[in-house]
Image (cartoon, rainbow, N blue to C red):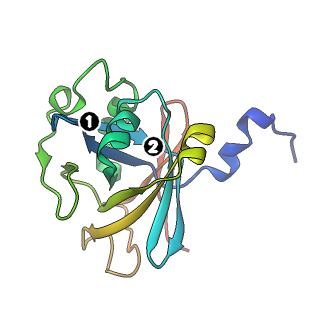
Amino acid sequence: MIDVDLKYAYRLLGLGSVVMVSSYDENDVPNLMTCAWNCCLDFDPPKAILVLGSGSKTRANIEKTHELIINIPSNKQKDLVLAVGSKHGFDVDKFEENNIEAKKSKLVNAPVVDGCIGYLECKVIDEPEMQKKYDIVMVEIVAAYADEQAFDGQKYTLNSELTTIHHLADDKLVATGNII
């Protein structure tokens, strides 16, 4: 065993699926950010948490609209995940720059990114202390849908053609491997 510098300790746990969080600002201009720090929180009603930096465009958007989409990208969207994660939403229109069409969601006012494995439509649960102190945004999932090639309605059926992706460090990602 090796000792791990505490600044990298999170990477031992942080192999959850990378997601892209989409939102609209108060003028219905879409924005998208990559988010590697996310997890499920509860079952009924379903909830999740995301760590979204207070200086991000997405965070500014959702503090006004209280709605977002968690887009679950596939391995085929690796380049988009890296591109979206490398620019600041206040500096560039990521939808325009990456030729993404902002598709309508079912229940919330936030754009869906075409080609993802799954989508979670979410409403922000107001937790100002957690948001301010830890940049943790808690959401209730109000609608969920997935590509039937990757998810059978109850679980992932991942194959080498369509998998989730996970952040290792810097610009390094890994696709989900074989089911064991």
The reply to whether discs 1 and 2 touch (Cβ–Cβ < 8 Å) is no
Residue 21 place in picture, x, y as percent: 35, 46
The quarter of the picture where the C terminus appears is bottom right
Residue at 57 percent of width and 52 percent of height: 15
- In the foreground, 126 or 25: 126
Q: Residues within 10 Å of mark 2 (few under 14, many from 20)?
A: many
Residue at 24 percent of width and 74 percent of height: 148
Residue at 15 percent of width and 29 percent of height: 96
Label 1 sits on a secondary structure element that is strand
Residue 153 place in picture, x, y as percent: 32, 80
Q: Give the quadrant of residue 156.
A: bottom left
- In the foreground, 159 or 29: 29
Residue under pointer 2: 35
Residue at 33 percent of width and 62 percent of height: 120
Q: How many marks?
A: 2
Q: Give the quadrant of residue 61.
A: top left
- In the foreground, 168 or 129: 129
Amino acid type shown at disc 1: Asn
Amino acid type shown at disc 2: Cys
Residue under pointer 1: 31
Q: Residues within 10 Å of mark 1 (few under 14, many from 20)?
A: many
Q: CA distance from mark 1 to mark 2?
A: 13 Å
Q: Residue furthest top?
A: 91
Residue 36 placement, left or right of 90 = right
Q: Nearer the viewer, mark 1 or mark 2?
A: 1
Q: Is residue 81 above or below residue 139?
A: above
Residue 138 placement, left or right of 95 = right
Residue 52 place in picture, x, y as percent: 48, 40
Residue 154 placement, left or right of 145 = right
Q: Is residue 87 above or below residue 84?
A: above
- In the foreground, 170 or 125: 125
